[in-house]
Image (tube, rainbow, N blue to C red):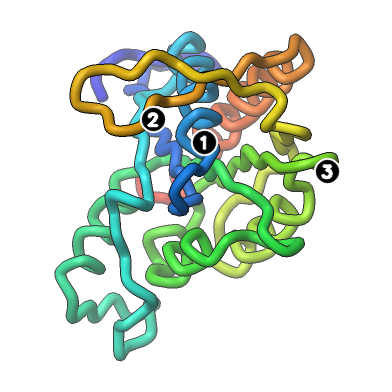
Amino acid sequence: MTTPVTSLVTTPITKPLLQIIIGSTRPGRVGPSVAAWFEAHARAADTFEIEVIDLVDVALPLLDEPNQPGEQKYTHEHTKKWSATITRADAVVFVIPEYNSSINAATKNALDYLYVEWNYKPLGVVSYGGISGGLRAAQAIKQVGAALKMIVMQDTMMIPRVSSMLSEATATSGTAVPLRTLTSTPAMDRSAATLLSELLKLTLATAGLRGK
C-alpha cells in the first residue's frame, strides 16, 4: 500500500486496502463472476488497493473455536489465518447470494469466527439473485455487520435476475470450469461507482477508529 490518495484529506496517505469477499461456496456459483465485474470497477477507480478473497479457498469449517471470538484466544490454525487476513483490511465488500430470504451459511460462518477484526471496518454489499437482487440477504448481512461494530453502508449494489446477465467465458489453461462473464447495465455501473465512492469516504473518515 504505497500509492498516495489525496481525496478528502489535505496530506497524502497510502491507499486503503479493500477486501472483496466472495461468499458463495457451492459448485456452479455465480459469485466469482459478479466479484470479477466489481473488482474491475474497483481497480479502474484506483482509490483502493484490492484483495479478492474466496471463501472456497479460505475453507473454514463450521465454527469450532471453544472461546468467544472477542477474546481472540484462537486454538485452530485456520482461525488464526482468517484473523490475520481480515486484520489487514481497511474496508470490506461482501459479494453474496440470497438463500431462503437471508445470507448463505458460509458467509455467516465466516463472519461469526471473528469480532475485533471486523470492528470499525466499513461494510459494503454486492448482492445478487432473482427479481429482488438479493435484497433480503443484503438486509441480513447489514444486521450482522452492525452487531460486529462494522461501519455499515446504506448504499447497496443489488443485481436482479443475475442469471440472465451471464455468458460463458473461454476456459483458460489450468481452469477446470470457465468463469462466466457478467454483462452489466449502465445503472449497475453507476451503482458500483457510487458504492466505491461512498466506501472511500467512510474508510478515510473512520481510519482513526481502526488505529490507522
Q: Which of marks 3 and 2 is in front?
A: 3
Amino acid at the residue labelled 3 = Ser
> Could you tell me if the residues under marks 2 and 1 are in contact, i.e. CB atoms within 8 Å?
yes
Q: Mark 3 falls on what kind of element?
A: loop
Amino acid at the residue labelled 1 = Thr
Q: In which quarter of the image is the C terminus?
A: top left
Q: Which label was assigned to residue 203?
A: 1
Task: Give the residue number, with chain letter if any, for mark 2.
Answer: 16
Relative depth, front residue between 106 and 171: 171
For label 2, the crowd category at 10 Å Cα-Cα, with few meaning under 14, some 14 to 19 and many 20 or more, is many
Relative depth, front residue between 92 and 164: 164
Q: Which residue is drawn at 29% across and 75% down?
A: 72
Q: Nearer the viewer, mark 3 or mark 1?
A: 3
Does residue 166 lie above or below 126 as drawn? above
Give the CA separation, mark 3 to mark 1.
Answer: 28 Å
Relative depth, front residue between 193 and 210: 193
Give the CA separation, mark 2 to mark 1.
Answer: 8 Å
Q: Which label was assigned to residue 154?
A: none
Q: Which residue is drawn at 56% across and 56% down?
A: 150
Q: Which residue is drawn at 61% across and 69% down?
A: 147
Amino acid at the residue labelled 2 = Pro
For label 1, the crowd category at 10 Å Cα-Cα, with few meaning under 14, some 14 to 19 and many 20 or more, is many
Position of 204 compared to 172: left or right? Answer: right
Farthest left residue in view: 77
The mark nearer the N terminus, 3 or 1, is: 3
Task: Give the residue number, with chain letter if any, for mark 3.
Answer: 132
